Image (spheres, coloured by chain):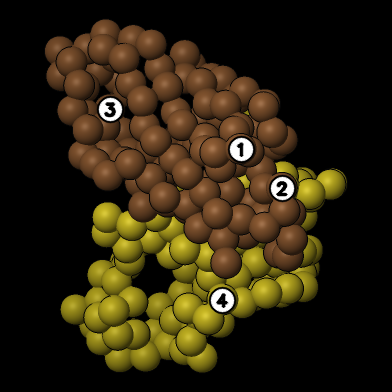
Chain colours: A yellow, B brown
Amino acid sequence: DTGVSQNPRHKITKRGQNVTFRCDPISEHNRLYWYRQTLGQGPEFLTYFQNEAQLEKSRLLSDRFSAERPKGSFSTLEIQRTEQGDSAMYLCASSLQTGYQETQYFGPGTRLLVL
Amino acid sequence: GDSVTQMEGPVTLSEEAFLTINCTYTATGYPSLFWYVQYPGEGLQLLLKATKADDKGSNKGFEATYRKETTSFHLEKGSVQVSDSAVYFCALISNFGNEKLTFGTGTRLTIIP
């Protein structure tokens, strides 16, 4: 059973650079979520997709952030003009939405450090 | 809006001690409730869940009961092991809106031999 995978696991970048993260969900899962976790806090919702459609974005997701899920499979999260405040763990989760309140399965995360 | 309040950490216990981590929530409607665990260097793993009032979720010796009257979902284990050392997150999904998870701040648990 292949779980949710994320790449890269770690990213160090300089302020002002662009970064892109990838998430591969569990293969039959139709929903994909992005969360951000800062040190000592619980994860916070950023955005989610149902198949290829992006259905909601949090207020945390400024216009420097963009997410895509082409063809309803893997997803990418891009941060443009990174700032030191973007340093965090970025988590991806997926679920098979057949009813509601389904369990979300998380990947290992991508830890971003902006210098 | 929805929110989850967790017992402040860190918590340090001796092996075989009884564990309780408190969790209370605020949500409209009838949320589903979850406990996730994060072991050092790893991602979040689902520990247990409950989807309606009075349901008890259980896994690996951990239990939590969905108490609607007290809006609580406290995590318990009768005898903890060193391998239970991790960060534990209480979370909910509201039955209104977009199915996002709302998390508490997490409780770091350390078990000493």
Residue drawn at (53%, 81%), measured in percent from left and top?
Answer: A59
**Residue topped by disc 3:** B85
First in sequence: mark 3 or mark 2? Answer: 2
Q: CA distance from mark 2 to mark 4?
A: 22 Å
First in sequence: mark 2 or mark 1? Answer: 2
Q: Are marks 2 and 1 on the same chain?
A: yes
Q: Secondary structure at mark 3?
A: loop
**Residue topped by disc 1:** B69
Q: Position of residue A68 (x, y in %)?
A: 64, 75
- Chain containing the residue with disc 3: B
Residue drawn at (69%, 33%), measured in percent from left and top?
Answer: B53
**Dot 3, how many residues are within 10 Å of its Cα: few (below 14), some (14-19), or many (20+)?**
many
Q: Position of residue A110 (x, y in %)?
A: 39, 59
Q: Nearer the viewer, residue A52 or A50?
A: A50
First in sequence: mark 1 or mark 3? Answer: 1
Q: CA distance from mark 1 to mark 4?
A: 30 Å
- Chain containing the residue with disc 1: B
Q: Position of residue A26 (x, y in %)?
A: 66, 46
**Dot 2, how many residues are within 10 Å of its Cα: few (below 14), some (14-19), or many (20+)?**
some
Taking B11 as reference, is B4 above or below it?
A: below
**Residue topped by disc 4:** A58
The three-letter amino acid code for the residue at tag 2 is Tyr
- Chain containing the residue with disc 4: A
Q: Secondary structure at mark 2?
A: loop
Taking B6 as reference, is A74 above or below it?
A: below
